[in-house]
Image (cartoon, rainbow, N blue to C red):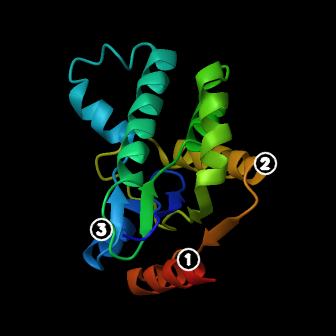
Amino acid sequence: MLKPRFFVLSGGPCAGKSTLLEALEAAGHLVVSEAARRVIEEDKDGNLRSNPLEFQREILRRQLESEEMAQSADSKSGLVFLDRGVGDHFGYLRHRRIPIFPELEWAWKRARFLYEKIFLCEQRPDYFAGGRQETKKEASEIHAAIREEYLARHPCIIEVPWEPLEGRVLRVLRACQA
């Protein structure tokens, strides 16, 4: 079994992360789904979301749990792609004006060295909400906050421009081999 190499796909809402991750998974790579999406789906009554700090803590807990499982999972290529990473929390907290909590700082110290590269996906030029709650303006603000936080915290950020899916997949895979 190859030692797993972790890569984060990040960016604001409507950046094509899910579609890109589906293509990478179809190509045989291990993909870790977004923790926030799972938490939101389970929080049908919205109780957890009504407390933004506890909501972020639960997402972080799930993120770390998923990353731990991926470290021992069988990945034929050795590449593990994460739908968002620990660093995304800093951007979301900044955007929502929520203070950084101690567990996040601790988690980032570990994640910074686990994540080889952060792929920051550019948002679709023709923003399509498609069931998302964020407006185009809010999505852009979230994207900017996530970008600034990763740039300040990780040495290897690769910006992935919006282009047809095949080009994005090749761009990401080539960068993983560089």
Q: What residue type is labelled 3?
A: Glu
For the C terminus, the image quarter is: bottom right
Q: Nearer the viewer, residue 79 or 3?
A: 3
Q: In which quarter of the image is residue 165?
A: bottom left
Q: In this view, does 162 lie above or below 148?
A: below
Q: Give the mark, 2 or 1, whose residue is nearer the N terminus.
A: 2
Could you tell me which secondary element the residue under label 2 belongs to? helix
Dot 3 or dot 1, earlier in sequence: 3
Residue at x-position 53% and y-position 51%:
12
Question: Residue drawn 68% across and 39% down?
Answer: 109
Label 3 vs label 1: CA separation?
17 Å
Residue type, label 1 = Cys
Residue 98 visible at all: no
Q: Which mark is residue 22?
A: 3
Mark 2 Cα within 10 Å, few/some/many (few <14, many 20+)?
few
Which label belongs to residue 152? 2
- Above or below, comparing residue 12 to residue 116 in the picture: above
Give how far across and how far down residue 93 sits, in percent.
Answer: 61, 29
Residue placed farthest to the front in the image?
Answer: 1
What label does residue 176 carry, if any? 1
Looking at the image, is mark 3 or mark 1 nearer the viewer?
1
Asked if the residue under mark 1 is in contact with the one under mark 3, i.e. CB atoms within 8 Å, the reply is no
> How far across and how far down the image is residue 60, in percent?
47, 32
